[in-house]
Image: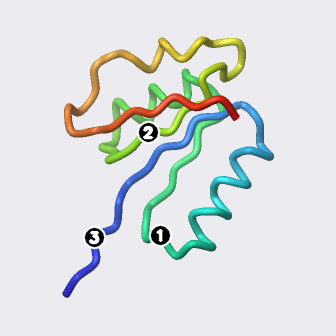
Amino acid sequence: METRIYSILVVDDNPADLYIIREAFSECGFRCQLTTASSPEEAQHFLHNERFDLVLSDFRADGDDGRSLSTPFAPETNLFRLSF
C-alpha cells in the first residue's frame, strides 16, 4: 500500500516559527513535502506555480492581515490562518 505524500505550504515571517513547524511535522512522522514562505508575496509565487493540499498561514505575516492569500487557487487546497 502506497502512502500519499501531502504538499503543504507554510507562510510565516518568523524564521523560528517556520523551523518549529518543520520540526513538528518531521518528528511526528507525517509524510509531506513542506514548502515555506516568509511573506505573503513569496507564498503567492508558490501558489501560482505549484499545487498544495494545505496552506498554513500566519494571520499577520509581515504586517499583512492574511487576506492577500485569499486570491483564488486550486479549489481542493485547504487554507488555515493561524496566529503563531
Q: Nearer the viewer, residue 78 or 18?
A: 78
Instruction: Point out the tag, 2 or 1, that comes first from the N-terminus.
Output: 1
Label 1 belongs to which residue?
30
- Crowd around label 1: few <14 · some 14–19 · many ≥20 (10 Å): few
Describe the element under mark 1 as helix, strand or loop. Answer: loop
Residue 4, numbered circle? 3
Left of 47 or right of it: where is 13?
A: right
Q: Calculate the distance from the C-alpha at mark 2 to the C-alpha at mark 1.
A: 15 Å
In which quadrant is the C terminus drawn? top right
> Based on the displayed image, in which of its 4 quarters is residue 1 positioned?
bottom left
Instruction: Point out the tag, 3 or 2, that comes first from the N-terminus.
Output: 3
Label 2 belongs to which residue?
55
Instruction: Return the x and y of residue 76 as percentages of the image width and height.
Output: 21, 39
Q: Calculate the distance from the C-alpha at mark 3 to the C-alpha at mark 1.
A: 10 Å
Describe the element under mark 2 as helix, strand or loop. Answer: strand
Residue furthest out toward the bottom: 1
> Based on the displayed image, in which of its 4 quarters is residue 65 positioned?
top right
As displayed, is residue 20 above or below residue 63? below
